[in-house]
Image (tube, grey):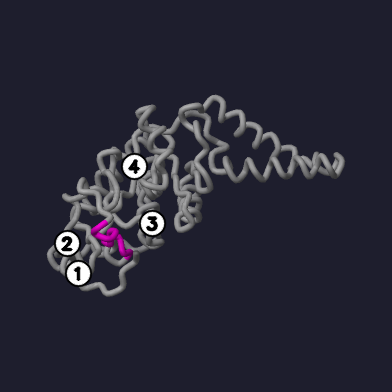
């Protein structure tokens, strides 16, 4: 059974690209059509790429490797945190700190400092010091939580990095490539898919689209670590999709999500 259907992608608005004048020609193979100056993705290929990506994430998760979820723009921040926490993975949703991967041994000192301060806070140490010292430590703790809160349990380099926007998360991609860490990424029509090891062609702006993609990666992690994802729903035979009908529906949708 497919991990996602074309209908689900359609309902999430994953088929909407950017304005045609902003496109990257290297995305040509993933474009189905143009509508009102907007590129429309071929959801057959999006579903296919998701399947490939899903299997990859399942595989590395079975091996005990970590995945870092990255999404620092407003539309992605909460989604990235929620989905990463749901599958017990790492995340960056505020700002990518330069050298996070390429200078990991140094960055890890900040992560350890965060854990140290949190321990002191829990133990009540902050209540035993002067107000001035307490304010300084709380300020430091707040800053470290913002930058490394989703990474404090990162003890070694990840097996993959998942980015929700390949333009916005450029630094994460460059560092990953430098260390040969596979990159999984949502690639919109204005992006270069050749930089991404496992590109997912689709809308990287709409909240529903971002949530769908992130939830699929989280599901893959859970399946790799624990087996099949339990949805709590009754198992039924999947309805066979008619790709041509779905593609026609792509062009009928009136509300563009760009």
Q: Is residue 174 visible?
A: yes
Q: Residue at x 31, y 69 (%)?
A: 256
Magenta extent: 12-21
List x then y, in percent, for residue 182: 34, 34
Please tell me how crowded label 4 is: few (under 14), some (14-19), or many (20+) other residues with Cα within 10 Å.
many
Q: Which mark is residue 184?
A: 4
| Residue 204 in the image: above or below residue 131 | below
Q: Which residue is mark 3?
A: 210
Q: Which residue is mark 2?
A: 33
| Foreground tag (2 vs 3) | 2
| Foreground tag (1 vs 4) | 1
Task: Give the alpha-carbon distance from disc 2 to disc 4, as whole Å.
Answer: 25 Å
Magenta stretch containing residue 40, yes or no?
no
| Residue 181 in the image: above or below residue 84 | above
Q: Secondary structure at mark 4?
A: strand
Task: Give the alpha-carbon distance from disc 1 to disc 4, as whole Å.
Answer: 28 Å
* Quadrant placement of the C terminus: bottom left
Q: Secondary structure at mark 2?
A: strand
List x then y, in percent, for residue 188: 30, 52
Q: Which mark is residue 251?
A: 1
Q: Is residue 26 left or right of residue 235?
A: left
Q: Earlier in the sequence, mark 1 or mark 3?
A: 3
């Amino acid at each position: 059974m497919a991990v996602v259907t074309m209908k689900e992608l359609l309902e999430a608005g994953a088929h909407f690209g950017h304005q045609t004048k902003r496109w990257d020609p290297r995305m040509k193979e993933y474009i189905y059509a143009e509508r009102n100056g907007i590129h429309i993705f071929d959801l057959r290929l999006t579903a296919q790429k998701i399947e490939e990506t899903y299997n990859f994430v399942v595989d590395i998760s079975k091996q005990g490797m970590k995945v870092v979820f990255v999404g620092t723009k407003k539309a992605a921040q909460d989604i990235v945190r929620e989905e990463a926490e749901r599958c017990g993975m790492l995340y960056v949703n505020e700002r990518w700190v330069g050298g996070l991967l390429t200078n990991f041994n140094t960055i890890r000192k900040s992560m350890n400092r965060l854990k140290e301060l949190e321990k002191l806070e829990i133990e009540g140490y902050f209540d035993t010091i002067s107000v001035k010292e307490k304010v300084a430590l709380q300020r430091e703790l707040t800053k470290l939580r913002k930058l490394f809160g989703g990474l404090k349990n990162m003890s070694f380099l990840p097996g993959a990095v998942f980015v929700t926007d390949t333009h916005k998360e450029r630094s994460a991609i460059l560092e990953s490539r430098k260390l040969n860490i596979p990159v999984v990424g949502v690639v919109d029509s204005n992006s270069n898919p050749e930089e991404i090891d496992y590109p997912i062609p689709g809308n990287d702006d709409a909240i529903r689209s971002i949530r769908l993609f992130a939830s699929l990666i989280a599901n893959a992690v859970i399946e790799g670590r624990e087996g099949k994802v339990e949805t709590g729903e009754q198992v039924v035979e999947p309805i066979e999709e008619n790709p041509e009908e779905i593609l026609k529906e792509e062009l009928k949708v009136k509300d563009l999500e760009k």
